[in-house]
Image (cartoon, coloured by chain):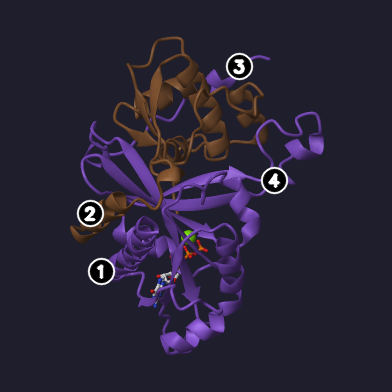
Amino acid sequence: MDFKSSEQPARTTGPRSEDALPETAAAAVKVVIVGGFGVGKTTLVGSVSEIRPLTTEETMTQAGVGIDDTSGIDGKTSTTVAMDFGRISINEELVLYLFGTPGQERFWFLWRGLFEGALGAVVLVDTRRLEVSFDVIGRLEERSVPFVVAVNSFPDAPEYPMEELRGALDLPESVPIVPCDARQRSSSRNVLVTLMRYLQGLAMAQEAS
Amino acid sequence: MSHPGGGDWEEASPERLYVITGGRSSTSAPVELDLVTLIVARSRPKPGMQPEHAAIIELCQSPLSVAEVSAYTGLPVSVVTVLLGDLLADNRVVARAPVPPARLPDRALIEAVIDGLQKL
Ligand SMILES: Nc1nc2c(ncn2[C@@H]2O[C@H](COP(=O)(O)OP(=O)(O)OP(=O)(O)O)[C@@H](O)[C@H]2O)c(=O)[nH]1
Ligand SMILES: [Mg+2]
């Protein structure tokens, strides 16, 4: 097999120098923001990220698969799915990455290990389309991924008291549910802190047992 | 969302991705790579390297996650993982593994994250 890759120049545009992580960055953790289309995942990631959100893509037809099958090469059967992410340097050693991913489970497998090893997840809910959230919440529970629910406030969305939403989403008492405006950094940060406090509680309960 | 810098690889076709990886879809990486494994180059790119390998080494002069390498090169994570496997096997980069799942939820870790978020 010939390497023809030198025909095209490699792109070397990297992070801006001020976006480079310090040499001391030793380990990273991740949090997944999951929700339906247009619910504000990218907005939330962007409002707290220290870098401009980046996009990584994956195709449904994996590289190399179906190479002998011309229908696969046409790209007709391949779908590209994008995932946005941002970054927060927690301290000199620790980096937090936030990944925004669509609520439909059929996309999750593309990002092998996305939820595996994640600290937890934020389920972003649009009250105009609660159905999407049922599925997501069910899947996270199955995978034992700890999560909190954030309710994005769109102007034309019906307003429910949080406790009514808890009932509608069939959420256990223990799972925090918070209103949020993903466009505001302080509000988005509050969502993340809510998740962390929840995880802190889980960790303390584990220590105690 | 846009790719920063724009570039030649945005439209990378399945054939082209196949060429870049030499047709391999799994990795020879001695370690399991996560989206947030941090990659650091051990040296500068060497002349004669496959351009994609050289580009990754160039990018990883300071630590960078696998996800960022994918975003900046415009290559899918699956392809980047194969390329990183080569570079790891050749000792050209090192991988700093994420906090292992077995340690989660780790209270000290969570509390460090809370501290960091409060400084935002
Ligand atoms: N009023 C209001 N609008 C918001 C909020 N969050 C996001 N939006 C708007 O909703 C639209 C969609 O937001 P995105 O962040 O792109 O949503 P997304 O979930 O990333 O969308 P997809 O990636 O396409 O699924 C944008 O026009 C945002 O400005 C919010 O909290 N309140
Ligand atoms: Mg988005």
Q: Amino acid at mark 3?
A: Phe
Question: Which chain letter matches label 4?
Answer: A
The reply to the same-chain question for discs 1 and 4 is yes
Spatial CA span between label 1 and label 2: 14 Å
Nearest to viewer (mark 1 / mark 4): 1
Q: Which chain is brown?
A: B
**Does the numbered disc 2 mark a residue whose Cβ is under 8 Å from ligand 1?**
no
Check the image and report above or below for A6 versus B16. Answer: above
Q: Amino acid at mark 4?
A: Ser
- Camera-side residue of A152 and A31: A31
The reply to the same-chain question for discs 2 and 3 is no
**Does the numbered disc 1 mark a residue whose Cβ is under 8 Å from ligand 1?**
no
Spatial CA span between label 3 and label 1: 49 Å
Q: Are marks 2 and 3 in contact (CB under 8 Å)?
A: no
Q: Amino acid at mark 1?
A: Ser
The label shown at residue A186 is 1
Spatial CA span between label 1 and label 4: 39 Å
Q: Please give the residue where the numbered disc 2 appears in the rendered image.
A: B116
Which image quadrant shows ligand 1? bottom left
Q: Please give the residue where the numbered disc 3 appears in the rendered image.
A: A3
Q: Amino acid at mark 2?
A: Gly
Residue A143, horizontal then vertical, whole percent: 57, 57
The first of marks 3 and 4 along the sequence is: 3
Determine the image quadrant of residue A176. Answer: bottom left
